[in-house]
C-alpha cells in the first residue's frame, strides 16, 4: 500500500475568517431580541443562548428557508474562493473549527462551491426538527481550558484531529491556523515553530497576541484577504 504523502493542515475559523460577518449576529437581525430575564432563565436552565434564539425565531414564524436566505447574504471574504481552489491540491487538508453551527457552515460552503475542499467540520451540531425549528447542541463540555468557552476548546479539537489522522497514517508537514477571534488564541498557542498562525488584522486575536509577546512559537502572519494567505502558501510550494 502506498504511503500517504505529508500534507499541510489548514485549520479555518468561520465567522469573520472564512465569511465576512458573524452568522449568529446575522440570524438575529430577523427580529430585535433583547436579552430579557426570560432568556436568561432559559440559558440558566441548561439551554444554550443561540438555541433559545432559534426557538424564539421559530415561534415568530421564521422558516428554515428564510433563515437560509439570510445566512447566504453573508459573503466570503475577498480571495477566499481563490484560496480554497488552491487548497484542492492533495498537498493540503482543510478542516473548519468554529463556534457557529454545522447547518450554517454547510449552507455557506455549498453555496460558494467549496464544500468538497473541506474534510471535516468541527462545530456545534445543529439540525431542523419536523416542525422546522433549528435545534443546536454544544460541541462538547470542557472545563480544562481557561482560554476557551465551556462548549468549545479549539485547541483540544485540533490536537485530537492531528492524533486521529496520525493513527490513519497521515503526517503533517506543518499546521496553518487561520482565525480572528479570542477563541482562536488557545489553538494558536499549541502550534510549533514550524507552524503558522494567519491572524486577521485589527481583530481580537491580533490584540491578544500583541498583549502576550513571545507566547506563540508559530510564525504569525497578518492578513486582510485570502490572497495574502495564498501568497504565503505559494512560497511553501515554490
Image: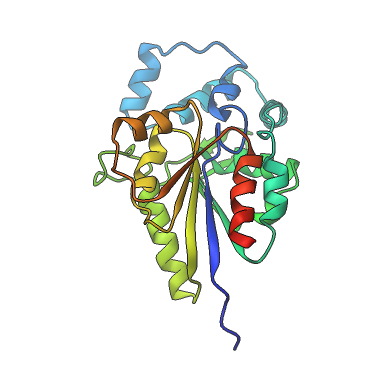
Tell me which corner region of the image, top left, top right, bottom left or bottom right, holds residue 215.
top left
Residue, x 58% and y 59% (percent of image)?
236
Residue 27 in the figure: left or right of residue 201 = right
Residue 117 against residue 163 in the figure, above or below: above
Residue 97 against residue 8 in the figure, above or below: above
Residue 160 against residue 188 in the figure, above or below: below
Tell me which corner region of the image, top left, top right, bottom left or bottom right, holds residue 87.
bottom right
Image quadrant in which the C terminus is located: bottom right
Point out residue 221 in the picture as x, y percentages from the top left corner. 49, 42
Q: Is residue 140 visible from the viewing direction of this image? A: no
Q: Toward the viewer: 112 or 60?
A: 112
Residue 124 against residue 160 in the figure, above or below: above
Residue 207 in the figure: left or right of residue 79 = left
Q: How is the image coloured?
A: rainbow
Point out residue 101 in the picture as x, y percentages from the top left corner. 53, 39
Residue, x 67% and y 28% (percent of image)?
74
Residue, x 43% and y 46% (percent of image)?
139
Residue 60 in the figure: left or right of residue 205 = right
Q: Is residue 220 visible from the viewing direction of this image? A: yes
Tell me which corner region of the image, top left, top right, bottom left or bottom right, holds residue 235.
bottom right
Point out residue 96 in the picture as x, y percentages from the top left corner. 54, 48
Q: Toward the viewer: 225 or 168?
A: 225
Residue, x 37% and y 40% (percent of image)?
185
Point out residue 125 in the picture as x, y percentages from the top left corner. 51, 45
Amino acid at each position: 500500500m502506498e504511503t500517504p504523502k505529508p500534507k499541510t493542515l489548514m485549520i479555518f475559523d468561520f465567522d469573520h475568517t472564512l465569511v465576512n460577518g458573524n452568522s449568529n449576529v446575522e440570524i438575529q437581525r430577523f427580529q430585535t431580541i433583547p436579552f430579557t430575564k426570560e432568556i436568561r432563565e432559559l440559558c440558566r436552565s441548561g439551554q444554550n443562548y443561540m438555541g433559545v434564539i432559534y426557538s424564539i425565531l421559530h415561534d415568530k414564524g421564521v422558516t428554515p428557508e428564510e433563515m437560509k436566505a439570510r445566512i447566504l447574504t453573508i459573503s466570503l471574504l475577498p480571495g477566499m474562493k481563490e484560496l480554497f481552489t488552491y487548497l484542492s491540491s492533495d498537498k493540503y487538508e482543510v478542516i473548519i473549527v468554529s463556534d457557529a453551527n454545522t447547518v450554517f457552515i454547510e449552507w455557506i460552503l455549498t453555496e460558494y462551491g467549496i464544500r468538497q475542499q473541506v474534510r471535516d467540520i468541527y462545530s456545534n451540531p445543529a439540525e431542523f426538527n419536523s416542525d422546522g425549528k433549528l435545534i443546536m447542541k454544544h460541541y462538547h463540555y470542557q472545563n480544562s481550558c481557561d482560554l476557551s468557552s465551556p462548549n468549545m476548546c479549539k485547541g483540544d479539537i485540533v490536537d485530537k484531529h492531528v492524533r486521529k489522522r496520525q493513527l490513519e497514517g497521515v503526517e503533517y508537514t506543518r499546521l496553518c491556523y487561520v482565525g480572528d477571534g479570542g477563541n482562536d488564541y488557545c489553538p494558536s498557542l499549541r502550534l510549533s515553530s514550524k507552524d503558522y498562525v494567519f491572524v486577521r488584522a485589527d481583530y481580537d486575536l491580533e490584540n491578544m497576541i500583541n498583549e502576550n509577546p513571545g507566547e506563540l512559537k508559530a510564525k504569525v502572519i497578518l492578513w486582510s484577504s485570502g490572497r495574502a494567505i495564498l501568497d504565503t502558501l505559494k512560497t511553501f510550494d515554490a
